[in-house]
Amino acid sequence: MSVRILALVGSLRAGSHNRRLAEAAVKLAPEGAEVEIYEGLADVPFYNEDLDAEGVVPEAAARLREAAASADAFLLFTPEYNGTIPAVLKNAIDWISRPYGVGAIVGKRVAVAGTAAGQYGGVWAQDETRKAAGIAGGKVLEDVKLAVPGSTTRFAETHPIDDAEVATALTEVIRTLADVPAAA
């Protein structure tokens, strides 16, 4: 039985480097781990307690919660927007953190990775994402990090899966998140 990892991508842009990094994660998942990219974050309304009541939860938010509930772990991919986490990713964390104390993220392992155009690869956004996921109840793996700088040039003509350094590091992130030992 494989560890089911739900990947949430904080960029909705067509051709997003973080989306491509998530696609690489799907292909690089080692034996014993399965990565699935969640589709539909653009359809999830901003979190609002008035919308979060039994029988009135928006369908897109309910689908996200169902997918999150069936996951064993989360791999969050974040670009850096103005030095912080993109709203779409924060909104997803908000929805899966509810109901408070028993949301779909509570007690599950969480790792954060990403790429950004700057020289630090989006570390501020990644730190904020770890903080939000931890407060939401996730078991954030603080030492599991992958911040790829210079995305606009590094991935201009190369998919992340074809970048040996990134592929090796991403495989290790997934392996650690899934708690799968390295192949002998």
Image (cartoon, helix red, strand yellow):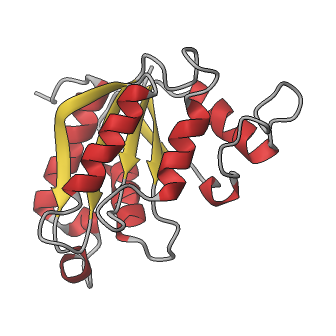
From the viewer's perspective, is residue 140 above or below residue 107? below
Q: Which residue is at the front of the view, 145 or 92?
A: 92
The C terminus lies in quadrant: top left
Instruction: Say which of 84 and 79 sits in front.
Output: 84
The tally of labels here is: 0
Which of 169 and 129 lies nearest the eye of the viewer? 129
Specify whether residue 33 is in view: no
The picture places residue 45, in percent across and down from the top left corner, at: 70, 52
Above or below 180: residue 88: below
Front-most of residues 100 and 184: 100
Q: Position of residue 178 (x, y in %)?
A: 31, 27
Q: Position of residue 113 (x, y in %)?
A: 28, 49
Residue under the image location 32 percent in, 36 percent down: 131
Residue pictured at 36% horizontal, 28% vertical: 134
Residue at image location 46% in from the left, 64% down from the top: 11
Classify the position of the N terminus by image quarter. Answer: top left
Tell me the residue at 23%/54% (across/down). 124
Q: Position of residue 176 (x, y in %)?
A: 22, 30
Is residue 49 visible in the rendered structure shown here?
Answer: yes
Q: Is 99 rendered above or below residue 50?
A: above
| Vertical relation: 18 (above or below) 75 | below
Q: In the image, 138: left or right of 55?
A: left
Going by the picture, which residue comes out furthest to the right? 55
Compared across the picture, whether 76 is left or right of 177 comes to right
Choose top left, top right, bottom left or bottom right for residue 154.
Answer: bottom left
**Quarter location, residue 5:** top left
